[in-house]
Amino acid sequence: MGINSVRKVLSTLAVSSLLLAACGGNEEGSGKNAGTTPKGPAPKQVETSKFSTSLTNDKKAVDGGTFTYGLVSDTPFEGVLNRLFYEGAPDYEVIQFFDESLLDADENYIYNQDGAATYKLSEDNKTITLKIRDNVNWHNGDPVTAEDLEYAYEVVGSKKYAGPRYDAQTQGIEGMTEYHDGKAKKISGIKVIDEKTISITFKEANPSVLTGLMTSPLPKKYLAGIPIDKLDSSDQIRKKPIGFGPFKIKKMVPGESVEFERNDDYYRGKPKLDKVILKVVNPSVVAASLEKGDIDFAEITADQYESAEKLKNIEVIGKVGLAYTYIGFKLGHYDAEKGLNVMDNPKFADKRVRQAFGYAIDNKTVGERFYKGLRFPANTVIPPSFPKYHDDKVKGFTYDPEKAKKLLDEAGFKDTDGDGLREDADGKKFKINFATMSGTDIAEPLAQYYIQAWKAVGLDVQLLDGRLVEFNSFYDMLEKDDPKVDIYQGAWGTGSDPDPSGIWDKTAPFNYNRWVNDENDKLLKEGISPKAFDEKYRQDVYNKWQELIADEAPSIPTLYRFEIFGANKRVKNYDLQGGASEHWWDVSVTDDKPETSK
């Protein structure tokens, strides 16, 4: 799972649902003191318990109306507007209005029978059969067919597909690896039964089939003739995308705004709004834009909350997000030809050095001082928004600079020349390039805080090229394994599926740390094995896995987040609770014009 806070997405609730987050970007609070957490009393903390997840407006809706959505970002959206190819969460914020996955989900993120398709799982749990509703049509009038979903899997399974969704779960489909390797012309485990019915069979039963199955079809006829390796750059994806969602794209200013019109042919019935306007709003003016009624809905950043909470014309809702921020280490590179991560960078090979980075930073104080309590310390890489699988017994990295120093000493990283900075175990200068993103006022002070905290334990960390990196460029550097990047601050939105293999598997392109570990491979497989249909067994597996990540420290989880949103008081029927669809078709307004603050 969208928001510029969570930058990359492996799917849309289905398909591993992972998002890369802009950790230093639009969700950040303000900070004055570069390099240290602010001194003196902590700022007033936001009382997150007071927020509902749904709007309370119970007035009668007007017929139609125009709704304006604020995409909060300090950078343009990239414009890869398709569920199988997009990676940036800003792109997802556009996609959510005009396209859907075939299966919807309940508040626990488990697929139900309410979406564009229904499903049936075989007795052995290995085969899922989807039946697409007869009235589900693409925006150009073509019916959404079983062949469209089959084509989506053929694209993802192709060697020419450059996206990140050829993951461990996809590879678990019967015949997928043979198809991918060019040994078969079709995927044997995918069978089109009739125009609207398709079955997908896995080699082994997989519990994530009901939370992470990819059910995003591609309009095969509309994309006909476009080579797979050209799809993501085609006009049909970038300039004239279609879906089967509640709204259709009418016009677009690339990277800046989109005007949607109602899809009267929507399978759930005519949407309640006539029109949706989406526009990029800089994080620094969110509260002012809500106050003036320039936008009806937007995420409220920590630095904007104090201004937003005073507004009389909005209602604020919120919840703990499916996301975490982390410090990552570049341990190797991704071999695209073999489809494998290769851990061949020795710079951070000693896990004690990685652990020291975690113990050197004070996440509790950062959450309180920079984020006013809207962020809180992360102890594992499975957030508490997964209560069944989050292990609160994992200690994580509490602030302990003396322990950090001891670990570095034990690893042989000592200050041999008396300059206050440690050399590596071979006595060589140990300089570290730190990459992090630009964003609101806090991005620079937060980066400097980390740098100074690491310097306090003797680590010579410098901001990469002396500056913050623009959002899209930052993730391009990680994907391409830019050798200048040693460590980085990133964030993940985990999405709805508890299976973490989309980030952590040795074949996952999103495994930006390029960490490879045999025990990791074993536990990830056990977590989606037939035995994992037993919830207790799966919990035990993921508890062991969280302990492994904490010990090996390929990433240092830093903060979880409480996400808050402001909605004009004329907005009705919006809820933050789970589900595969954002349910924009049901959102309405109760006045023709937005309320303004009085």
Image (cartoon, rainbow, N blue to C red):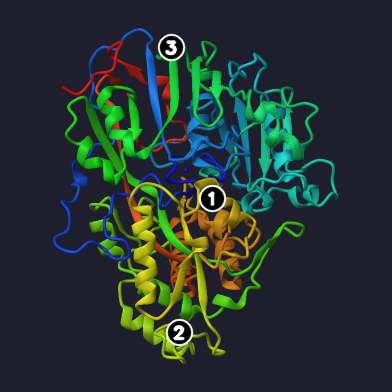
Q: What residue is shown at x 56% (from left), y 68% (from top)?
A: 520
Kindly identify which residue carries mark 2. Answer: 422
Q: Position of residue 251 (x, y in %)?
A: 55, 18
> Could you tell which of marks 2 and 1 lies nearer the N-terminus?
1
Question: Given the image, on which type of amino acid does mark 2 rest?
Answer: Arg
Label 2: element kind = loop
CA–CA distance between discs 1 and 3?
40 Å
Viewport quadrant of the C terminus: top left
Kindly identify which residue carries mark 3. Answer: 274
**Are dots 1 and 3 in contact, CB under 8 Å?**
no
Label 1: element kind = helix
- Kindly identify which numbered label has been placed on residue 207: 1
Q: What residue is shown at x 56% (from left), y 78% (from top)?
A: 349
Q: Position of residue 419 (x, y in %)?
A: 41, 86
Question: Given the image, on which type of amino acid does mark 3 rest?
Answer: Asp
> Could you tell which of marks 1 and 3 lies nearer the N-terminus?
1
Q: Position of residue 479 (x, y in %)?
A: 61, 55
Neighbour tally class for label 2: few under 14, some 14-19, many 20 plus, Cα within 10 Å:
many
Q: What residue is shown at x 56% (from left), y 30% (from top)?
A: 102
Q: Nearer the viewer, mark 2 or mark 1?
A: 2
- In the depicted view, which residue is nearer to us: 53 or 65? 65
Q: Is residue 409 above or below residue 314?
A: below
Q: Is residue 502 above or below residue 523?
A: above
Question: Given the image, on which type of amino acid does mark 1 rest?
Answer: Pro
- In the depicted view, which residue is nearer to us: 166 or 314? 314
